[in-house]
Amino acid sequence: MQLPPGQSLTHKFPVVGEKAPPEEALDLEHWRLELGGQLTSALDLTYRDVMKEAQDELIADIHCVTSWSQLKMSFTGIRLADLLARLGVAPRDTAQFVRFEAYSHRLHDTSLPLAVALSDSWLVHSFEGQPLTPSRGYPLRVVTPSRYFYKSLKWLRRINFMENDRLGFWERTSGYHNTGDPWQEQRLEGARFTSQDETDAFRDLTDFVEWRTIATTDTPRVLVKANLRNWRPHTRNLTSLQLKACDFRGADLDHVDFTGANLTLGNFTGASLRSANFANADLEGADFSGADLSGAQFANNFLSATTFTKNGRSLLGFHGMTMSAPDGLLEEQRAYLEKLPGVLE
């Protein structure tokens, strides 16, 4: 068995990204899948139209950007190229990219080169012989196994064939890599999103009001792959900040309030996080191995592929650490935390 670099094996199917679609996505009587753009003929399909086509089984390894992988997952659906062929339409010669658009509250979308979409993208409705749950993309989602899972859009609404590319939701708002090849570990493009000058200025701030997450905007301020090693912030209030894939190694973060923050893929090795508050923070893929979490409080966190022990390196401190309602803990990490007295409530 071989995994892409930085991935952890699981037998779970963690729920990642947005958790619930708008009601219109689940209304099958009015649900539509539109196909258009650089296509020989535009299509407007009902759910019955999609389901009456011959359905096939896809057995595929799935790799999430948050660092979990599950092998040989079984989906039921139809390959995009097969659907087009059966409906008698084809991309025009001018088509070079495909954009998938979602029924979602934040209008998620993502794009792929046309060749990748035609060779590798499937429209699926079932997992392990059962309909997908709404949190995992029911009634119809994309699965593109050769790319990180954020390229596999949930709640599919429209497929647009394009002459020119356009960055997708996560790519333009959070610095996710536009290619997303897990074997090349193309997770985020920090250089495109966060400059060194911006990082230096951020480290010196005494107030982070301008960096707070604003739920109504499509472009919140996000720090991506920033060097925050040995950082000692001037304030302990880091609530609701979006600090993705940042390097916190050796940082002094004692008593910091991270409530509601997004710290996905953060490296906290060797950091001091005594009595830090992580309530409602997104910690998917974060590495806390070797950190001091004595007295730290975890509650209602997303923890898929989050590590507390890794490569023989465990927590430096955990006395008084508590964790309630963890979401998505992988098997090895849960087993480790269960051995720590008083941690898992």
Image (tube, rainbow, N blue to C red):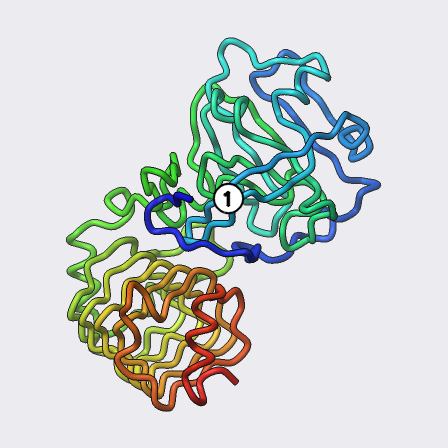
Residue 210: x and y in percent read: 33, 64
Left or right of residue 25: residue 334:
left
Residue 82: x and y in percent read: 65, 20
Left or right of residue 261: residue 103:
right
Q: Callout 1: 10 Å neighbours few (<14), some, many (20+)?
A: many
Indicate whether 165 appears above or below 272. Answer: above
How many tags in the picture?
Answer: 1
Q: Residue at x 61, y 48 (%)?
A: 104
Left or right of residue 284: residue 91:
right
Q: Residue furthest top?
A: 93
Q: Residue at x 33, y 86 (%)?
A: 275
Indicate whether 323 appears above or below 261. Answer: below
- Quarter of the picture holding the N terminus: top left
25 and 3: which is toward the camera: 3
264 and 75: which is toward the camera: 75
Mark 1 secondary-structure assignment: strand
77 and 179: which is toward the camera: 77
Q: Residue at x 50, y 44 (%)?
A: 62
132 and 338: which is toward the camera: 338
Q: Which residue is mark 1?
A: 62
What residue type is disc 1 on?
Ile
Left or right of residue 26: residue 323:
left
Figure quadrant of residue 292: bottom left
Figure quadrant of residue 244: bottom left
Residue 223: x and y in percent read: 30, 57
Q: Residue furthest front?
A: 1
Indicate whether 196 appears above or below 275. Answer: above
Residue 163: x and y in percent read: 47, 18
Figure quadrant of residue 164: top left
